[in-house]
Structures are given as structure tokens and as C-alpha cells.
Amino acid sequence: MTGLLWALETLAWHPDYLTAVIVLLGDLAAVDPGGNWTNRPTNSIVEILLPWHPQTCADVSKRKAAVNTLLHEHPALGWKLLLSLLPKTHAIASGTRKPTWRALIPAGCTEKVTNREHWEQVNIYAQLAIDVAESDRSKLTQLIDHLPNLSGAAHTRMLELLASDKTTGLPEQERRPLWEALVHLATNHRKFADADWAMSQEAVAKIEGVASKLIPKSPPLALTELLNSLDLPLQSGRSGSLWVW
């Protein structure tokens, strides 16, 4: 398997081969039995497309096309890929195999990306992820965890989707996990408001506003359970807060 992965990683450097390589790696990932080795098809796909450390000379439009093709051919894998390409507080990259004998890397190609190029890619992948979640709202909960690291446009669109009539009109059993995830997120960022990674209080307030639209119809028991899980004091009637009922 390792030799095959190295061969595909090598070909991925050339823009003309990127989409075919990503699809082939997706085919391999679909039948991968798993194991302890980190050198696996899914890891190769992520390494090739990392926004801050791309291992391909294909331009951003071709990378987007490759991801779209993977989403079409292997939807579940494509979804996991999109989540893996979104920003994280801590991330590492090991790189992929480079060509040795053939000049597959065009002159001028570099692994370095500017801040603008990085966020351009992040926004593309975030928008694709929101597209998927919009058609399958069961995926929204997973995206909520990434809200703090989404760019402005994607962050705003995500909140608008969560606050939309289609989302707030979901059955309570589908709406409640979204509400709980938003409350957990907002509580964590208020609790550690002075941390470098914390969102601004204004951003947290917007999340709380969206959460208030998703609150369960019979909240006392639900709120008690949730607040107990957060290890917070239960305060009934607290003005301007999520915890009012």
C-alpha cells in the first residue's frame, strides 16, 4: 500500500493529475480496512490539499474541483475531508512524496502560501461544507465545533443557516443537539473569555441569540440536564441570557 500511496502522492503534484489522484485515493480509502499505520489513503488526501501546506501545484480552482468530484464519488469521505481541511487550533503536516525522476513540479511552484491564499482556500472548503450541511442538517452539529475558526463570510452564513426557518422548524429531537452544541460553545468561550483562542463577546452573543431560537419547547428539564453537564449554577430568570425560562 505504501508504494502505491507514494506513487499517487507524486502524481498529485502535477495540476493535470490532481482530480484523478484524489478520486483514486478515495477509491482506496473506501476499501481500506484501517490499521495503526498513519500512511493511509485518507491521510494522503488531506496532506495533498491542506490549505496552509498544499502538496500540489494545482491552483485553487482545480483543488476545489477535485474536492467536489470526491464529494460526488464518495460523499461520506468528502464530508470528512472538508472537516479536516477547516482550521484547527493546533495542526501538523508531514508532507507527501515528491517526484524524483520526472519533472512533475512546474517551475515556480512552491509549498508556501500567503495569508490571503490560505484563507481563500479555507473559505472555499467552509462554504462547501455548509452546502453539504444545508442539504443534510444532521451534519450541522459537527460544523458548530468549527464556528470559531471559520472566516467571516462562512461564519455568518453558518449562523444564518442555523437561525433559518428550515432549521428552527426541525423536529425537537433534531433541533436539540444543535441547541446543545451552541450552548456548549458559547459557555466555553464565555468561561475562558481571556484566552487567546476565545471569540469576542459580541460573537458569543450572536451565537447565544441563534441558540435561543433552537431552545426546546419544554426547556426546564432540558436546561437543568444541560447546565448540570456543564457544571454551572442554575439561575432561573437571569436577564439577557440563554438560561431564562
Image (tube, rainbow, N blue to C red):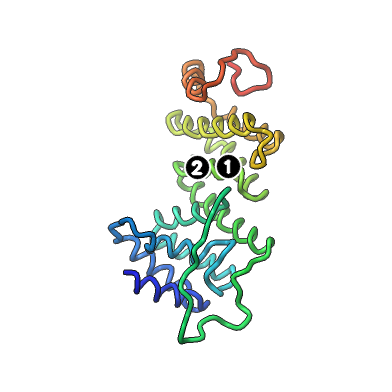
Mark 2 neighbour density, 10 Å: few (under 14) some (14–19) many (20 or more)? many
Say if 31 sits above or below 192 in the image.
below
Q: Earlier in the sequence, mark 2 or mark 1?
A: 2
Q: Position of residue 12 (x, y in %)?
A: 47, 74
Marks 2 & 1, CB-CB < 8 Å contact: yes
Q: Is residue 66 above or below residue 243?
A: below
Instruction: Give the amino acid at mark 1.
Output: Leu
The mark total stands at 2
**Could you tell me which residue is drawn at 43 percent across and 68 percent down?**
22
Please state which amino acid type lies under the numbered disc 2.
Leu
The image position of residue 132, as x and y in percent, is 49, 51
Name the residue carrying label 1: 161
Q: Is residue 205 left or right of residue 55?
A: right
Examine the image and state in which quarter residue 57 appears: bottom right
Quadrant (top left, top right, bottom left, bottom right) of the C terminus: top right
Q: Is residue 71 left or right of residue 193?
A: left
- Report how far apart the C-alphas of labels 2 and 1 lie in the structure: 9 Å
- At x 47%, y 16%, the residue is 221
Q: Residue at x 48, y 32 (%)?
A: 175
**On residue 207, which mark appears?**
none
Q: Which residue is mark 2?
A: 140
State whether residue 3 appears in this view.
yes
Q: Nearer the viewer, residue 112 or 213?
A: 112
Residues 86 and 52: in front is 52
Q: Which element carries disc 2, helix, strand or loop? A: helix
Label 1 environment density (alpha carbons within 10 Å; few <14, some 14–19, many ≥20) = some
